[in-house]
Image (cartoon, helix red, strand yellow):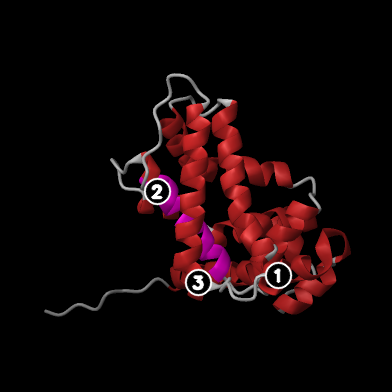
Amino acid sequence: MNMKKSSDPKASQRGSREQGRESTRQRLLEAAGIAFAEHGYDRATGKEICERAGANPAAINYHFGGKDKLYAAALHEAHRRFLTAEDIRAALPPGTPPAERVGIIIRDLLSNLLTTDPSAWQLKLMTQEMMRPTPFLDELVRAEIVPKSMFLRGAVAELLGRPDSHPAVQLSCMNIISMCLTQYLNREIFRRVFPDLILSADGLELLTAHTLSFVTGGLRQVAATLPGAPLPQEKP
């Protein structure tokens, strides 16, 4: 005998409401990212964000608890869209030599910077936060940036034979990250100064190879100033 599976109308309604709430939340997050990237935290208004999202004026308080928390959520979302810790972990299988890990991280960082639309709100918002930090930067660094940076710090620490808290390790990581970010932040200037270079996704292979060669040479020189530390490998 065939029996029809009974449906629960209340459960279906609850599911629809939850989907609706999540949809509204995502629309608010997207609208907020655009507004904050365009106007900054101070000048972006809840009214504009709700209008962009097609949401009730009270929606920001309901879904995020206020403009402050919405801005913090937008910052975290921006950083996750750019690069997640899971992305980095997946690209670095256990047993990958440290020099190769450094190379993979540089390649992925440059790739994400150079292939993301420059007008995308997430990059504009992160750049804005770097140039004009808000009180929300500390939590972003703690929750998103520091965990991701540990992959690079660990690899560089192995190469230099020092703990990841050593100044030489931290300065080396800071210089590697700065080099990659500079190629993105100043690329419109670099394009005009060096018009023969392809400073876009089409030139990624050359940019990555040169940056990695430069970094490897720098790490070897740093290692040479640290008695007893092993020299980094020539090729990652």
Q: Which residue is at 45% across, 35% downward?
A: 154
- Secondary element under disc 1, as helix, strand or loop, is helix
Q: Earlier in the sequence, mark 3 or mark 2?
A: 2
Q: Is residue 111 magenta?
A: yes
- Other-residue count near label 1 (Cα within 10 Å), few / some / many at <14 / 14–19 / ≥20: few
Q: Which residue is mark 2?
A: 89
Q: Specify start and end residues of the magenta stretch as a single range.
A: 100-114
- Measuring from the top left, give residue 150's x and y in whole percent: 50, 39
Compared across the picture, whether 65 is left or right of 208 comes to: right
Mark sitting earlier along the chain (3/1): 1
Judging depth in this view, the residue of 216 and 91 nearest the camera is 216
Q: Give the secondary structure at mark 2.
A: helix
Mark nearer the viewer, 2 or 1: 1
The residue that mark 3 highlights is 203
* Neighbours of disc 3 within 10 Å: few (<14), some (14-19), many (20+): few
**Label 3 sits on what residue type?**
Gly
Q: Amino acid at mark 1?
A: Val
Q: Nearer the viewer, mark 3 or mark 1?
A: 1
The label number, if any, that marks residue 93 in the structure image: none
Residue 189: percent from left, percent from top: 72, 68
For the residue pair 198 and 9, the one nearer the viewer reads as 198
